[in-house]
């Protein structure tokens, strides 16, 4: 058993947010121990990261390597693919409209994880214990973690990057309202005969979004949100039959589709803790927020958690896990996390709901984004976060009567 008293920061969890946390804290000069298994090599998803997140990756020194196998997102489109009475216009955001080349990049998670893993392993200021945290003891001055390899790690601040179930969050006594959704995401990549022109398209359907995001070449990734039983049926189809289903679902937008082997299904849920830090533990990534994959929000938000946590820890360098530091972290992250979580959940519920007011409100929200150019430009320029638009949709869902000035795309 070894105890390293000089360790300042312990990161629990080795998903993308944990690995990024370790790198960002080490870069800011903190001593870091990270605990968790080797990074996932079998994650078949891709992740669209927007410019603010790319800036963080660049600062950490991994963007160059990551961009070699990524596709820029130059145009982002939302298409109402429901067959409901009230349907929205197509909403198209073009980076060129605001003088930018792209909104972000789409990365393969397997590459993202591998690049981050190499960077963490190669960093002299980070010690990686390939073990799980089995037990937490949270005192007034230190967090003590007992790992599955029998070692102890003491730290002034423990970063809970241990995912949606977050044992660290539970140990900190932070309750969370969590709910399983009647939806699952079928995830796969495919080749197609037409160019994607670096356009991502989110079709909104009655079971959730069907989202196609460009990869390098004539290839794209798909996240298809359906009922769990439908996801299983689709995943059981042979390659030819599934290719035809996908091509039909997107009205041959990308020509002939040929799916890659390997499909994955992700059950969907939502989770929101009452606080984002307490008792020497700060929550980041899915320990701090879980919602359905609409509008490429989750990891972008997780990267902002890390960025702000490191900034606040640096301001409280004498004791980065103090109650004052954690209170500052909680209040700085609260508005962003609540806005994104609320907006994405509302939009998701409006897709699933058959109720007319929900449909009308969603239509009005998309109308505003689709038509009124100062608002569109505002959303695109504002941090280049297409997710900001979802906050507008949420606002319209709450007060649909207020929106007047709309124009179709
Ligand atoms: C289908 C789908 C598509 C998505 N697409 C996008 C997108 O395009 N853009 C975007 O921004 N977001 C997207 N997201 C969201 C994004 O994938 C998540 O936000 C992100 O993966 C969360 O990473 P994380 O590191 O917080 O959690 P995880 O990846 O779940 O990592 C948690 C880690 O904690 C470890 N762990 C658990 N318990 C312990 C313990 N006791 N001790 C130590 N370690 C422990 C686990 O082993 C794991 O390594 C998508 C999500 C889904 C489901």
Image: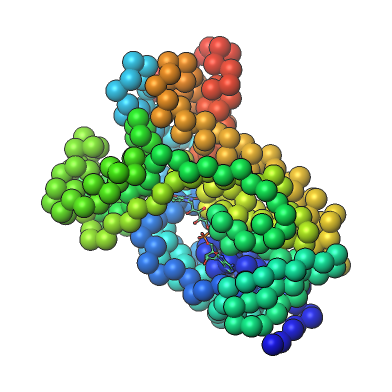
Question: Residue at point 43% right, 18% down?
Answer: 355
Question: Residue at point 42% right, 61% down?
Answer: 109
In the rendered structure, the answer to whether residue 327 lies left or right of residue 405 reads right
In the rendered structure, the answer to whether residue 254 lies left or right of residue 117 reads left
Name the quarter where the N terminus is drawn. Answer: bottom right
In the rendered structure, the answer to whether residue 204 lies left or right of residue 344 reads left
In the rendered structure, the answer to whether residue 373 lies left or right of residue 108 reads right
Question: Residue at point 54% right, 22% down?
Answer: 397
In the picture, residue 360 is in which quadrant? top left
- Above or below — where is 348 with respect to 364? below
In the picture, residue 131 is in which quadrant? bottom right
Residue, far left: 240
Q: Position of residue 76 (x, y in %)?
A: 41, 39
| Depth order, front residue of 302/51 | 302
Q: How is the image coloured?
A: rainbow
How many numbered marks does the figure carry?
A: 0
Q: Can residue 379 be seen in this view?
A: no
- Above or below — where is 2 with respect to 133? below
Q: Can residue 98 be seen in this view?
A: yes
Name the quarter where the C terminus is drawn. Answer: top left
Q: Position of residue 299 (x, y in %)?
A: 53, 53
In the picture, residue 211 is in which quadrant? top left
| Depth order, front residue of 394/263 | 263
Question: Residue at point 62% right, 61% down?
Answer: 167
Q: Where is residue 77 in the image (x, y as percent from the top left)?
A: 38, 35
Q: Position of residue 378 (x, y in %)?
A: 57, 31
| Depth order, front residue of 382/358 | 358
């Amino acid at each position: 058993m070894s105890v390293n008293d000089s360790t300042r920061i312990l990161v629990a969890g080795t998903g993308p947010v944990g690995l990024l946390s370790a790198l960002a804290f080490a870069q800011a000069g903190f001593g870091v121990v990270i605990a968790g298994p080797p990074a996932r090599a079998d994650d078949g998803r891709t992740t669209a990261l927007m410019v603010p997140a790319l800036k963080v990756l660049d600062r950490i020194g991994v963007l160059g390597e990551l961009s070699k196998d990524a596709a820029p997102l130059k145009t982002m489109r939302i298409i109402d693919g429901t067959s409901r009475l009230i349907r929205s216009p197509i909403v198209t955001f073009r980076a060129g409209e605001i003088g930018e080349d792209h909104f972000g990049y789409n990365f393969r998670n397997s590459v993202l994880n591998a690049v981050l893993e190499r960077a963490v392993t190669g960093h002299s200021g980070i010690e990686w214990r390939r073990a799980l945290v089995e037990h937490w003891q949270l005192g007034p001055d230190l967090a003590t973690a007992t790992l599955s390899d029998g070692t102890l790690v003491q730290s002034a601040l423990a970063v809970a990057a241990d995912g949606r179930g977050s044992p660290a969050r539970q140990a900190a006594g932070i309750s969370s309202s969590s709910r399983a959704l009647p939806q699952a995401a079928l995830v796969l990549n495919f080749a197609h005969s037409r160019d994607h022109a670096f356009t991502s398209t989110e079709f909104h359907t009655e079971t959730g979004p069907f989202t196609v995001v460009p990869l390098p070449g004539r290839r794209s990734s798909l996240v298809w949100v359906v009922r769990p039983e439908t996801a299983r049926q689709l995943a059981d189809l042979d390659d030819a039959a599934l290719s035809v289903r996908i091509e039909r679902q997107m009205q041959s937008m990308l020509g002939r589709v040929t799916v890659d082997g390997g499909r994955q299904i992700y059950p969907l849920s939502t989770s929101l803790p009452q606080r984002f830090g307490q008792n020497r533990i700060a929550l980041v990534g899915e320990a701090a927020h879980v919602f359905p994959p609409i509008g490429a929000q989750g990891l972008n938000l997780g990267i902002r958690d890390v960025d702000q946590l490191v900034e606040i820890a640096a301001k409280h360098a004498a004791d980065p896990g103090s109650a004052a530091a954690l209170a500052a972290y909680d209040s700085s992250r609260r508005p962003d996390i609540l806005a994104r979580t609320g907006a994405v959940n509302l939009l998701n519920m409006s897709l699933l709901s058959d109720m007319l007011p929900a449909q009308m409100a969603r239509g009005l929200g998309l109308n505003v984004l689709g038509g009124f150019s100062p608002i569109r430009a505002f959303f695109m320029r504002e941090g280049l976060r297409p997710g900001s638009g979802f906050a507008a949709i949420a606002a319209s869902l709450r007060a649909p009567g207020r929106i007047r000035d709309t124009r179709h795309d």
